[in-house]
Image: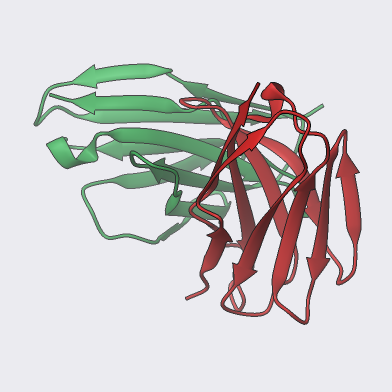
Amino acid sequence: SQELEQSPQSLIVQEGKNLTINCTSSKTLYGLYWYKQKYGEGLIFLMMLQKGGEEKSHEKITAKLDEKKQQSSLHITASQPSHAGIYLCGAPNTGTASKLTFGTGTRLQVTL
Amino acid sequence: SQTIHQWPATLVQPVGSPLSLECTVEGTSNPNLYWYRQAAGRGLQLLFYSVGIGQISSEVPQNLSASRPQDRQFILSSKKLLLSDSGFYLCAWRGAAWTEAFFGQGTRLTVV
């Protein structure tokens, strides 16, 4: 089955700093979703990347899909306390595209 | 616009009692529907998914079942809850174009 590994698992950055979160798939990626979650709440959809090389932005958050590396990266510029939370990537399963598999998440803390 | 409703938000149930969590979607037709469980930590475990009325795929054999009696309704059930069923349950839908996938606010279930 397809697995998504996120790195790092947790991250503490100072406000104003940039950061990158990676999501690597064990199999071919046919698209990738990024979400943000506050503790105890539902997942907030950030963006979906469909094609290799595609790059999208949502406010100060930018994500890119590298099909060859089977990887997506999410980059936050000039982090703010409002960026704190858990970031999760999800992807349709290779072979059974109706299934959506998720990574284990990256917990981001932003310090003042 | 599309909306997903999931209820209740919190639930405390005794061991051995039945369970019924409901999820409904508005503003779309023939969505893919999903039930996930999130244990302490971050990962999302896919429990069930459905591509159409009456079509349920089970990912993890366990004490739970799912049903889709209507196109935009997805129900998670159990006849007798176990302590290990405690967790944060999330419903999600994905439209036909698969460019977006949205989550409900989640139900925190505590089995006592």
Q: How many marks?
A: 0
Locate residue B101 relative to residue B35 in the image: left or right.
right
Residue B96 appears in view: no
With respect to residue A71, does B64 lie above or below? above
Identified at 62% across, 69% down, the residue is: A24
- In the rendered image, the residue lying farthest to the left is B16
Residue A86 appears in view: yes
Residue B27, image quadrant? top right
Locate residue A89 relative to residue B78 in the image: left or right.
right
With respect to residue A103, does B64 lie above or below? above
| Chain identifier of the green chain | B
Residue closest to the eye, B35 or A87: A87
Question: Horizontal and vertical percent for residue A4?
Answer: 55, 65
Q: Quadrant of the C terminus of chain A?
A: top right
Locate residue A31 relative to residue B87 in the image: left or right.
right
With respect to residue A29, does B69 lie above or below? above
Residue closest to the eye, B36 or B44: B44
Residue closest to the eye, B72 or A65: A65
Question: Horizontal and vertical percent for residue B60?
Answer: 32, 60
| Chain identifier of the red chain | A
Residue closest to the eye, B63 or B90: B90
Q: How is the image coloured?
A: by chain
Identified at 64% across, 31% down, the residue is: B25
Question: Horizontal and vertical percent for residue A55?
Answer: 90, 57
Identified at 26% across, 29% down, the residue is: B19
With respect to residue A87, does B73 lie above or below? above
Question: Horizontal and vertical percent for residue A13?
Answer: 64, 37
